Image: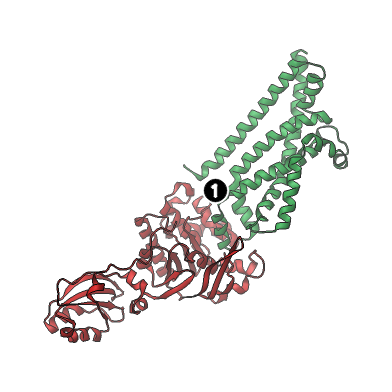
Chain colours: A green, B red
Amino acid sequence: MTWSEMQPLLEQGTVDTLYMVLWATLVTILGGLPLGILLVLTDKGGLLQNTVVNKVVGVVVNIGRSLPFIILLIALIPFTTFVVGTFIGPTAMIVPLAIGAIPFFARLVETAVREVDHGLVEAVQSMGGSVPTIIRKVLLPQALPSLVSGVTTTVIVLIGYSAMAGAVGGEGLGSKAITYGYQRFDTQFMLVTVVVLIGIVTVVQLIGDLAVRLLARRGRTA
Amino acid sequence: MITTSGLTKVYESRGRQVTALDGVDLHVREGEVYGVIGQSGAGKSSLIRCVNLLERPTSGTVTVDGVDLTALAGNGRRAGKDLRRARSSIGMVFQHFNLLSSRTVKDNIELPLEILGVSGAERSRRALELLDLVGLADKAKAYPGQLSGGQKQRVGIARALAGEPKVLLSDEATSALDPETTRSILQLLRDLNRQLGLTVLLITHEMDVVKTICDSAALMQKGRIVESGTVGELLATPGSQLAAELFPVSGAPTGPDRTVLDVTFHGEAATQPVISQLSRTYNIDISILGAAMDTVGGKQIGRMRIELPGRYEENVVPVGFLREQGLQVDVVDEETASDAAPVLVKEGAK
């Protein structure tokens, strides 16, 4: 394959990958953030201590995390079809990607929120702050640097998942690598695809690190 | 202003019960600075946390400004609306300041006002006013990470005052600070107490804190209050450990056939040069062996150890004179005179 043949494939692949990952990240944050906070709040000694809810959510999250993504992808085909109308194409892939990443991100959120100094929670309680106030004004802002770093990690995991999604009718760089690189034995194309993926991951990590550094700097020195 | 009665807190950990508070009755009058002192693990922290119900007492009641908080508590761990409103009129400062590192100093002070639903412009005005009050007018835009410990605690105090509370709870507010900063923070608390009529309940393991600013004090041991009262009342109590620690006197007689007296000034009598009157009236030489005195509002508070020539039998009349002046006089045996004051509170909470 010549470079001019590769170029449109790579461009289309990159656009599809970014499209899938971006939307899946958004859905993951919307789903994982409340779950992670719920895990902390309902834990023993938490503000909304509730052993039953905590155990149930914990087990669901663990099951979600243990399932190999490729299995999840196939198992979710009926659900994806129900939601999107089809299980093929980048839009359809957003569903399994998000469902696969939500438990992962929820655990990252849990760790980040748990690290917030309990003294701060106590201080806001002493001011008469309610639980929603504590979440909004203490837990989320104080955990923000860790949360952003968790999002970065999640985006990178999603890029990896999205490549796998190529095997089950998804689009994107992964699908291109499988179709052209693997099935047609085009090692050169395969290598180029991998390099593009490495580039995307590196850029995401750099942006994430920069954001974390900017956020963390507020708290420390001038 | 603050009354607790029969306050008990029992923690359960791994099936074992630990009694942190064992029937605490505390009474803090309006406008006073009340210090609770005790060693680590005496139950001070549990006590102050029970006052605004950050900890739910196992039994007993807490009344602040006429409101029975324990009745507002309701069931479950979540604080209901009424309790939250009551809490917003009780300020609290913490040993480790507990400022939000993600907010500027000014935004930290605005936080309680946000919770109270005060509008933005009003919040800003009040925050700047409070910063001025605690002497940090130039630090509004700084982040807590850029401040020294003393400055952080000033922000903590400003934040605690934002909701215009009548009561301020201080949980070891100076324990993480160096001695000089401690003094300036205590001075600030004293000023606020006087200017705003703020009632302050503080817990500490440092006797100096009580000495510097407290009108009343209580000694806590093993979850119980073993002594309490105004500084004057404590002094008037024979054998009071707190009085002995607040006003330690020592000193051995300079020779045989001397009478050593501990004279306690309760602050009831206005300042009179009693010792020199005694000396002139009876024409005797008096040595002062040791003294811990303070003059507060023109009244003398404290204790003094003096020595009169001759044995006690020869000094009955001068001792009678001192008692007539409204002073408490204790005769010190030679053996006890040389003993050092007992160590009541050891250093080292955290």
Indicate the amino acid at tag 1. Ser
Closest to the observer: B262 or B178? B262
For the C terminus of chain B, the quadrant is: bottom left
Q: Is residue A68 visible?
A: yes
Tell me the residue at 21%/84% (across/down).
Answer: B319
The residue furthest left is B283
User: Mark 1: which secondary structure?
Assistant: loop
Closest to the observer: B111 or B281? B281
Tell me where residue A132 appears, x and y as whole percent. 65, 57
The quarter of the displayed image where residue B295 is located: bottom left
The residue furthest top is A2
Q: Is residue B142 visible?
A: no
Closest to the observer: B14 or A104? B14
Q: Mark 1 — on which chain does it sit? A: B
Tell me the residue at 51%/68% (across/down).
Answer: B47
Q: Is residue B275 above or below residue B162?
A: below
Left or right, B280 with respect to B55, comes to left
Neighbor class of circle 1 (other Cα within 10 Å; few <14, some 14-19, many 20+) is many
Tell me where residue B240 appears, x and y as whole percent. 36, 75
